[in-house]
């Protein structure tokens, strides 16, 4: 499932990311979900919003290893952007 996502192709809204987060919440660690929920209350650059959307996309169908890789990327975005 090595899908290349170019986050610059489509600009997503915070609402898009929030809806995606809700859909994927049951598949991710609770601490990550709550940190992401908090991060979405901050003023984020469009690039970060697009990256978050891409990372959440199809999260539910990933293998455990792929999901863990995405979790690391999500955590880095959270740490770099203030939550």
Image (cartoon, rainbow, N blue to C red):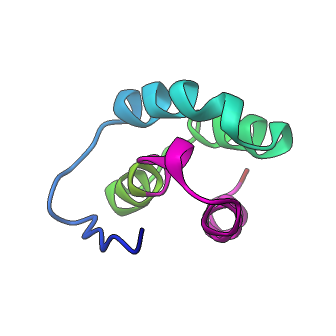
* Residue 73 position (above or below residue 52): below
Q: What percent of the width, then of the height, locates residue 69?
A: 65, 71
How many marks are shown on the rendered structure?
0
Residue 51 placement, left or right of 68 = left
Residue 69 placement, left or right of 32 = left
Residue 52 placement, left or right of 15 = right
Residue depicted at 29% across the width and 68% down the height: 5
Instruction: Please give the range of residues in magenta.
Output: 55-82
Residue depicted at 47% across the width and 50% down the height: 44
Nearer-the-camera pick, 68 or 35: 68
**Is 83 inside the magenta-drawn segment?**
no
Residue depicted at 56% across the width and 37% down the height: 40
Quadrant where the image shows the N terminus: bottom left
Q: Quadrant of residue 8?
A: bottom left
Residue depicted at 43% across the width and 47% down the height: 58
Nearer-the-camera pick, 56 or 67: 67
Q: What percent of the width, then of the height, locates residue 67?
A: 64, 60
Main SS category, magenta section: helix
**Is 65 inside the magenta-drawn segment?**
yes
Q: What percent of the width, then of the height, locates residue 23?
A: 52, 26
Q: Residue furthest left?
A: 9
Nearer-the-camera pick, 31 or 29: 29
* Residue 31 position (above or below residue 62): above
Q: Quadrant of residue 6?
A: bottom left
């Amino acid at each position: 499932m090595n899908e290349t996502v170019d986050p610059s192709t489509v600009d997503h809204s915070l609402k898009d990311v929030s809806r995606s987060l809700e859909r994927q919440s049951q598949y991710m660690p609770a601490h990550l979900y709550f940190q992401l929920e908090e991060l979405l209350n901050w003023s984020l650059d469009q690039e970060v919003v697009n990256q978050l959307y891409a990372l959440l996309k199809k999260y539910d169908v990933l293998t455990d290893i792929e999901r863990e890789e995405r979790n690391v990327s999500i955590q880095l975005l959270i740490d770099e952007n203030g939550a």
